[in-house]
Amino acid sequence: MRLVLASSSPRRIDFCRALGLDFVSVAPDVDETLPAEIEPAVAVRGLATAKAQAVFDRYADAIVIAADTLVALDGEILGKPLDRTEAANMLRRLAGREHTVFTGLVVASSGECQPEVVVQTQVRFRDLTKTNIDAYVSSGDPLDKAGAYGIQGPGAALISEITGCFSSVAGLPVCQLSRILTLRGAMPSTVVCGTGLDVAPASIVQRSPLR
């Protein structure tokens, strides 16, 4: 079966390419507005499922990969900043503190149960000065990222410690994905994913097939 990545994210595309996957990328048309007070794990699971469903409706003969990532501080979801002022405010809140990054992963295909995986990774920011924050915000890097930072770019300089899966913080838990695709017979046999990329526990829930 062919693979379809339900995302136009350059980071997720790069991860799939690095795994040696033969896939096409399709941007899902999904309303990502979240209800008030929703739990982060529930939110990422629901958004990943909605993205998978939106693309699966158009590619029912494919294996569809979908993911969603959110940042939460003290249980509060920090989404993508609306502007530079909001980005700077988020970074000030995160400075010197630990937060949790939640990534939901759904791999769906016809006749197969869809594993819903939620990976939680702990990230601690170093203490940041106003100069640090202003410089990063001026780069434009935080404006399209949950929590106003990206771990795979200049935002890595903001981080003092990470406990869990690096690739999940960047948007796609590659070891969980590779394990699921291996079970489906869709993973290149030459690729072996080391455990070092995925040390955070993940909950896997079997759901009904997408229809």
Image (spheres, rainbow, N blue to C red):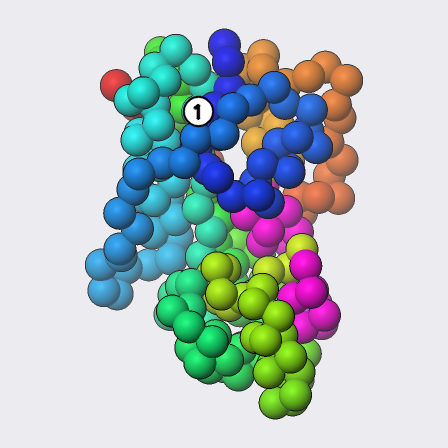
Q: Position of residue 97 (x, y in %)?
A: 58, 78
Classify mark 1: residues with Cα within 10 Å, few (<14), some (14-19) or many (20+). many
Residue type at mark 1 is Val
Q: Over which residues does the magenta segment extend?
A: 153-173
Residue 124 location, quadrant: bottom right
Q: Position of residue 142 (x, y in %)?
A: 54, 66
Any part of residue 184 in sight: yes
Q: Residue at x 59, y 60 (%)?
A: 150
Q: Secondary structure at mark 1?
A: strand
Q: Residue at x 69, y 24 (%)?
A: 20
Residue 40 location, quadrant: bottom left
Q: Which residue is mark 1?
A: 64
Q: Inspect the magenta stretch and tell me whether residue 24 lies in it.
A: no
- Which one is in front, 189 or 120? 189
The quadrant in which the C terminus is found is top left
Q: Position of residue 189 (x, y in %)?
A: 72, 15
Q: Residue at x 63, y 23 (%)?
A: 21
Q: Inspect the magenta stretch and tell me whether residue 170 lies in it.
A: yes
- Which one is in front, 28 or 169? 28
Q: Is residue 145 above or below residue 45?
A: below
Using residue 144 as the reference point, say whether residue 54 is left or right of it: left
Q: Is residue 119 above or below residue 108?
A: below
